[in-house]
Amino acid sequence: MSKVILCTSKTAETPFTFLNTKVEIYTYEELCFYIFNNTVLISKSVLSEKLFNFIRDELGMDELADKLTSLMNKTTYAQDLLIEILNAGDYYTTEEIKTYAAAWQKYRKLGKLQKAKLKADGYLAYRRYIKAATLYDEILDDVTEETDSEFLGNVYHNRAVAAANNLDIDDAKKYFLLAYEHNNNPDSLKGYFYTIATREDTTTLKEEIRIRGLEDKYFEDIMAEIGDSKSDVQEMTIFAMLQRAVYNRLNKDMTDYDKRMDIILAQLKDEFREQSI
């Protein structure tokens, strides 16, 4: 969670875990924050006796738990139950909850592919790269000639990010280029060149840049961006660390390249095990 949460309610001894994102919740305030920012990842199946019992037994909110239980079979949408949870305390203001409710009314009117992308984007944000890639592939299987080109390009871009973070370099390269062809986003083109650089030398990279009609300064700018990137930290994505490793390799600094690749591979193994559960 990326926000400081001031908790004034009871803290659970045993947390509730949202299994699809591996996020653990200990307080009512944390539950509200998660709901407010991740509703697209919360299916009605999650709103079960397990959550209601957590609210009752661990948070001491019997009245809310009873209300949710009674409403469970009377409402169609998970968001209606989630709004009940948000309304049960004062972590969010009435106006904020109204804005939240209005946003999800708009969400219900979105097309199938738009909804699916929001869900896939949510998993991508939580580094559930295998799940995100699967959902993006399902979107790509359903596109038609009428699908908006920029939307399609953005799907390709995020699919490439998922591939890069799983070190599927060939797929990342392919999808970044497809993304740029549809959305004309400079970040997609940079991603394409970054993935090329993971396997090729500077001469090949420069030639590829020229083929795309760009000047040699573009290569210099890319290398400068990677060189100025922050040091490896746990919060960096694998792709961000990979970019830094590429910079080391292209500059013949194989010692740092090997160190970073060891870190990347170790983190990739850990994340793959988590995503396979």
Image: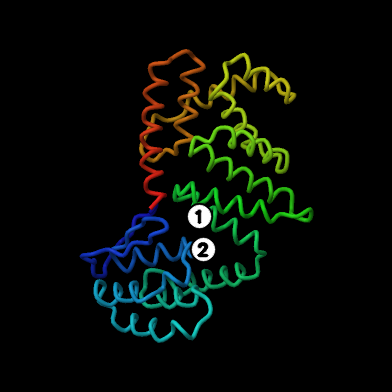
- Residue drawn at x 56%, y 23% is 197
Q: Position of residue 13 (x, y in %)?
A: 20, 65
Task: Give me the C-alpha separation between circle 2 and circle 1.
Answer: 7 Å
- Residue drawn at x 52%, y 76% is 77
**Which residue reaches farthest front?**
276
Q: Which corner quadrant holds the N terminus?
A: bottom left
Crowd around label 2: few <14 · some 14–19 · many ≥20 (10 Å):
many
- When asked about the image quadrant of residue 233, the answer is top left
Contact between marks 2 and 1 (CB within 8 A): the answer is: yes
Crowd around label 1: few <14 · some 14–19 · many ≥20 (10 Å):
some
Label 2 sits on residue: 40
Q: Position of residue 227 (x, y in %)?
A: 48, 23
In the structure shown, which secondary structural element does the residue marked by tag 1 occupy?
A: helix
Q: Position of residue 87 (x, y in %)?
A: 41, 77
> Is tag 2's residue or tag 1's residue first in the polypeptide sequence?
2
The residue type indicated by label 1 comes to Gly
Q: Is residue 274 left or right of residue 173?
A: left
The image shows residue 154, relative to residue 87, as above or below, that is above
